[in-house]
Image: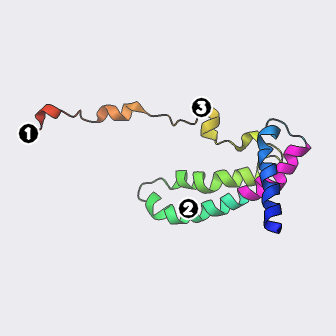
Amino acid sequence: MKTKLLTLVLCCLTGALPAVAGERGPLAIITDAVVVRPVSLAVTALGAGLFVVALPFSVPSKSTAATAEALVNYPARMTFERPLGDLDSLSHPALAETGTTDDAVDESKFSELPEENPAAEP
């Protein structure tokens, strides 16, 4: 019974997130303190664990700093440094800068690839 009640409360509060985005009123502060901060803390802990798992792969590729930023630092900043009730800053910085969810593709990298010649195959 307690689990169903907790699930219902979290669903109601999560559904209120779009309604309180853009304002820092009491509902935004309560939603942030009760729902968003605990979830951000859990994501930070989960990201730290994933970082340890990804470390053997990120060290040879020299992407340890980017991996740490994405999995640990960013969620930690959203948990501990963001002002209470500021739900607008929850979007990822890359998404906030471009205003889109599409990843920008650097097409200059593809200019170095040789073109395939299907007529050259026997």
Label 2 – label 1 distance at C-alpha: 47 Å
Q: Counting residues from the N terminus, which is met first, the one under dot 1 or under dot 3?
A: 3
Query: Are there few (<14), some (14-19), or many (20+) residues within 10 Å of tag 3?
Result: few
Q: SS for tag 1?
A: loop
- Residue behind mark 2: 51
- Residue behind mark 3: 98
Magenta-colored span? 26-40
Q: Is residue 37 magenta?
A: yes
Query: Count the marks: how many?
Result: 3
**In this picture, residue 96 sits left or right of residue 105:** right
Which residue ends up furthest to the left in the rendered image? 122
Query: Is residue 40 positioned above or below 113 on the image?
Result: below
**In this picture, residue 28 sits left or right of residue 18:** right
**Image quarter of residue 95:** top right
Residue at image x 23%, y 32%? 115
The reply to whether the C-beta atoms of the residues labelled 2 and 1 are less than 8 Å apart is no
Amino acid under label 2? Phe
Amino acid under label 3? Thr
Give the overall secondary structure of the magenta segment: helix
- The quadrant of the rendering that contains the N terminus is bottom right
Q: SS for tag 3?
A: helix
Name the disc covering residue 12, or none. none
The reply to whether the C-beta atoms of the residues labelled 3 and 2 are less than 8 Å apart is no
Q: Position of residue 51 (x, y in %)?
A: 55, 61
Name the disc covering residue 122, or none. 1
Q: Position of residue 50 (x, y in %)?
A: 56, 62
52 and 12: which is toward the camera: 12
- The quadrant of the rendering that contains the C terminus is top left
Query: Are there few (<14), some (14-19), or many (20+) residues within 10 Å of tag 1?
Result: few
